[in-house]
Amino acid sequence: MDLSDLQEIVSQEREMQRPTRINVCIAAGCLSSHSHLVRQRLEESVRESGLGEEVQVCGVGCMSLCCEGPLVRVDPALELYERVTPDQAPSIVAGLRGGAVLARRGDLQRPFFTRQQRLVLENCGVVEPERIESYIAAGGYLSLYQVLREMNPGDVVEAVTRSGLRGRGGAGYPTGLKWGTVAKSQGQHKYVICNADEGDPGAFMDRSVLESDPHRVLEGMAIAAYAVGADQGFIYVRGEYPLAIRRLETGIRQARSLGFLGTQIFESPFNFRVDLRIGAGAFVCGEETALIASIEGRRGTPRPRPPYPAASGLWGEPTLINNVETFANIPSIIRYGADWFASIGTPKSKGTKVFALAGKIRNTGLVEVPMGTTLREIVEEIGGGAPDGARIKAVQTGGPSGGCIPASALDTPVDYESLAHLGSIMGSGGMIVMDESTNMVDVARFFMEFCMDESCGKCIPCRAGTVQLHRLLSKIREGNGTLEDLALLESLCDVVKYASLCGLGQSAPNPVLSTLRYFREEYLALLSERPGPAVPAEGAVPAVS
Amino acid sequence: MIEIEQRRAALGKEEDHPSGDNRFRMLDASMKRHRHQPDALIEVLHTAQEVFGYLQEDILQYVAHRLKLPPSRVYGVATFYHFFTFKPKAPHTCVVCLGTACYVKGGQGLLAAVREQAERINHEVRGEGPWISVETARCLGACGLAPVVVFDGEVCGNVEISDAVERMKGWRPDGSV
């Protein structure tokens, strides 16, 4: 495989293009509302009406607006149809010849679409995830070619460093720095791991990327492997994502047969193979050392760091672990340049971030915006606000490790530092909107129950602390709490936060602490003994610069 | 023609697993694919659960023996991960998602209703095990469709309590509603 072969595939793909393309979303969300039947009916109708030469039906990845699925988009007319049923499918084909379309027409000009800046998701809803040729036609694997032929590993690390990309898994560690550390580490073998164990309830960005554009992640991993000197990669996917697993298996097979994975890639000395590892339902395996233990076939318990995986990871060898979205950013950085990437976002947080918008909000789905966009823009303009005229009370980011941001702080720009300042975290990108009907003590208890169940049991602050925190929250929720319980709750949060071994325990108190900070009155209202007005009003929102 | 048939029959016999249970053949194939490496334990357990439905104790023993691992290690790993079960599956399963989005959209109430309905039907049926088992999921990643319930493997979004109850009524063995 060389550049001319790549171009050959691109031109073949162009020749196959029909003037009109009907795209049907075949990601998990739309599939569960039967988009496969819609696709089948569309194909039948095209055949029956003899339009085979002019119209093609394509199964594409996620078109973002998951709540209105199944979605169908007709190109190049750019007509969007929402909630399409199989029975309506023939009318869409008839509509191409001026017939009446029975399906509900959607508006591609609404802010939900126009306010997004798509970088990681640029191919989602455009390329066919099950065909590598479709990805190549969209410029895929060109970045890998460019890296292998024109850059040495040091240049790649330098470019990623210059781009300012930070880890999209939640903690926001500078990606270039991590790559540089692994590149410098000495070892017999080095490994690259893609963390696709998207355990945060309410987050589905990684699932969508893997289902819609799996090759992008594979290409990013291959570039990373070249930069750090690894020859083996693993993708650790949640067992709960069967479709993503299937698409990745297909993708790896296709990439291997075309020579983008395997030995002597693009006729260079670079070898790289990728294997899948399927998770078995343990949230803690999102933590990097626990994930490594799980890949090694052991119980997924974390270990103290240092040594960091960059020095001693999988089987004691230097290992690079990045999140799906981080890898998905890499091909764009190489293709459009580090400076272009660095021009997007805020001074400290570069690029875009994909959020999974869900909960009490009109438009649920995937949203990709430049860093520094305010929460209000995301929730009210793009998301369309709460349905049925309800008022938004809080936005929860970062899942069980994050916090609840009150409506009064919605003007905060989204970047790693601002969210941390508010007592939440960027997290992997789940964003759950809550309205006035949600009780915040309930929310805190919900997350604590989650952490209690998911605690691996290795360290005591987390194992026992989460149980006690949950017990206290339940007591307060049931109206039996006292002011002493509240004080105990706060001090115990402190212990669990600072004494736990890994990120799960260290961040488990975050939902409690943030709800206590902004919605303290809801806790106080539930106490059995009502305090007097002397209680300090810590519910005030701090000023955000 | 007959010769081919005979040969095929003979081959089939040859490929039978010594235990007489051909599901072990699939399990063996999975272990062979991973070259009996101990680090493939989780992958092998996935296959075992897929072909046997659940992880019986003797299966765990068998895997331990073939991968040359202490049984404690195999048991330890199998019990650590939520995905593995040690009880046979009921004829019908109902998985209620309790992810944050589903929670905010009333997943708890839905779960209570589903549990109540399952109990009612299980009480009517009274077999060896439950007729319907109700499970919960952490998050199915279909948050745009919250609340989500998986009825016998089929993911359904925007589920109302009445939909769920009707659907489960249809699972009664006699088909009565």
Image: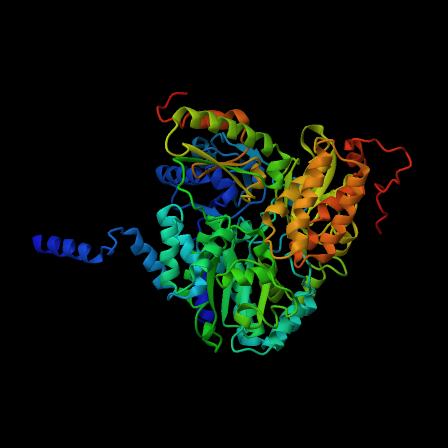
Residue at x 15%, y 53% (from the top left corner): B9
> Left or right of A364: which side holds A478?
right
Residue A426 horizontal/vertical position (percent): 70, 52
Q: Extreme top residue here? A: B177
Residue A150 vertical position relative to residue A340 in the rendered view, above or below: below
Residue A499 horizontal/vertical position (percent): 72, 57
Q: How is the image coloured?
A: rainbow
The answer to whether residue A426 shows anywhere in this view is: no
Residue at x 63%, y 68% (from the top left corner): A308
Residue A381 horizontal/vertical position (percent): 71, 40
User: In the rendered image, which quarter is residue B89 located in?
Assistant: top left
User: In the rendered image, which quarter is residue A262 located in?
Assistant: bottom left
Position of the N terminus of chain A, as image quadrant, is bottom left
Residue A94 horizontal/vertical position (percent): 44, 34
User: In the rendered image, which quarter is residue A375 located in?
Assistant: top right
> Left or right of A207: which side holds B128?
left
Residue A483 vertical position relative to residue A231 in the rendered view, above or below: above
Residue at x 55%, y 42% (from the top left corner): B142
Please name whichever residue, A158 or A432, is drawn nearer the observer in this view of the structure: A432
Residue at x 78%, y 41% (from the top left corner): A486
